[in-house]
Image (spheres, rainbow, N blue to C red):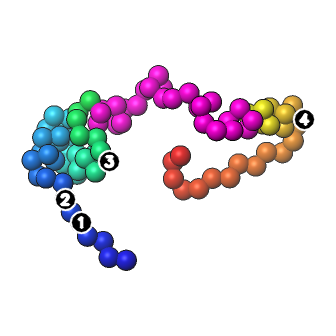
Amino acid sequence: MRWTHTPPPEGDVEALSRQAEVSRALAELLLRAGLTVPDAAAGFLQPALSALNDPFLLPNVTEATDRLCRAIAAREEIIVLGDYDVD
C-alpha cells in the first residue's frame, strides 16, 4: 500500500493552531477530522459528559443491559472482550 501525505492548507493549520491554542501538528489532525473551528476543536479535546448522546439510542443496548443484569443477579461469570481502539 502506498500512502500519499496531502497536508491541509497551511493557512488553515496556522489559523486553527493559533485560535484553538494548540500545536500545529494537533491543528492538522483536527482539520483532518473535520474540526475546522476552535469551538468544535475544544469540544473534541475536552468533552463533557453532558454533550454525549444517550447510550440507549444505540441498537440492542436495552437488551444487552437486561442480559447483564440477569447475569449479575444469577452470579454468572461475565467475560468482556475488547479490541485496541477506544470505542
Where's residue 13, x and y in %? 16, 47
Circle 4: residue type = Ala
Residues at marks 2 and 1, CA–CA distance in whole angstroms: 6 Å
Q: Residue at x 44, y 26 (%)?
A: 51
The stretch of residues the image draws in magenta is 40-64
Identity, as a three-letter code, of the amino acid under mark 1: His
Residue at the far bottom: name it: 1
Q: Mark 3 is on which residue type? A: Ala
Which structural element holds mark 1? loop
Q: Position of residue 78 (x, y in %)?
A: 79, 45
Residue 51 belongs to the span the image colors magenta: yes
Q: Residues within 10 Å of mark 1 (few under 14, many from 20)?
A: few
Sequence-wise, the earlier of marks 1 and 4 is: 1
Q: Is residue 72 visible?
A: no
Contact check, label 3 and label 4, Cβ < 8 Å:
no
Q: Is residue 46 above or below residue 9?
A: above
> Which residue was labeled with disc 4?
74
Q: Earlier in the sequence, mark 2 or mark 4?
A: 2
SS type, badge 2: loop
Which label is found at residue 5?
A: 1
Image quadrant assignment for residue 43 = top left
Does residue 65 show up magenta in the picture? no
- Amino acid type of the residue tagged 2 in the rendering: Pro
> Callout 2: 10 Å neighbours few (<14), some, many (20+)?
few
